[in-house]
Image (cartoon, rainbow, N blue to C red):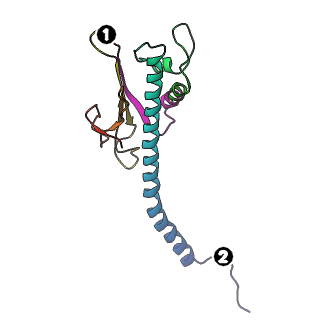
Amino acid sequence: MGKRTTGFSLLELLIVVGISGIIATIAIPNLLTAKRQANGASAIQTLRNLHAAEMTYSFGIGRGNFADNLAYLGGESDSTTSHCGNPAEIVAQAEKVRRERAILSYRLKIFGVRQKSETQSATYHAIFRPLVGSGILHTHNEMFYVDETGILRHSGSSTVWPDENSAPIP
């Protein structure tokens, strides 16, 4: 009678580990790329929502001026603010989550507002910047910008700040 063994041999286990490693080296970079693209799409949509909320505020209770605080857009009610509708609530919720650093690795970096005067019209601009701009864990490759025109723009880089002269997003 021969001795019977059960289980896998060392060679079989090494083959499985090797194949798993090859699959991981192919899949992980693609997964990180997909995540970066999703982060960028989320930032762009949030800027669209922000623009819609600013326009709603401007045509409503802002009387031609833009909100200089995201809380004014979010419908938080007290004696100085007023409800402005769903797009504003979306932006306010996104900003609240963003402050907690839990949403898709972007941060609202600059939010500038100039109120209208007799000689100048009201303006605003907002820039979304990736939290991690370089390295293997970078969250996206570029920054995004929107202003009162509603044209979304991108910098093409995580180190160059976008402005009204940057390339528009198609």
Report helix, strand or loop for mark 2. Answer: loop
Inspect the image, locate mark 2, and give the three-letter code of the amino acid beneath it.
Gly
Q: Give, as a single range, the part of the protein colored magenta.
A: 93-118
Q: Is residue 105 visible?
A: no
Above-or-below relation of 92 to 104? above
Q: Residue at x 49, y 20 (%)?
A: 73
Rounded to the nearest angstrom, the CA distance separating label 2 from label 1 is 81 Å
Q: Are marks 2 and 1 in contact (CB under 8 Å)?
A: no
Q: Residue at x 34, y 41 (%)?
A: 142
Quick one: which residue is furthest to the right in this view?
A: 1
Mark 2 Cα shell of 10 Å, populated few (<14), some (14-19), many (≥20): few
Above-or-below relation of 45 to 62? below
Question: Which residue corresponds to mark 2?
Answer: 7
When asked about the image quadrant of residue 161, the answer is top left
Q: Which mark is residue 117?
A: 1
Decide which of 64, 153 is in the foreground and name it: 64
Q: Is residue 115 visible?
A: yes
Decide which of tag 2 and tag 1 comes sooner along the chain: 2
Residue 95 location in percent, x, y? 49, 28
Residue 100 highlighted magenta (yes or no): yes
Inspect the image, locate mark 1, and give the three-letter code of the amino acid beneath it.
Ser
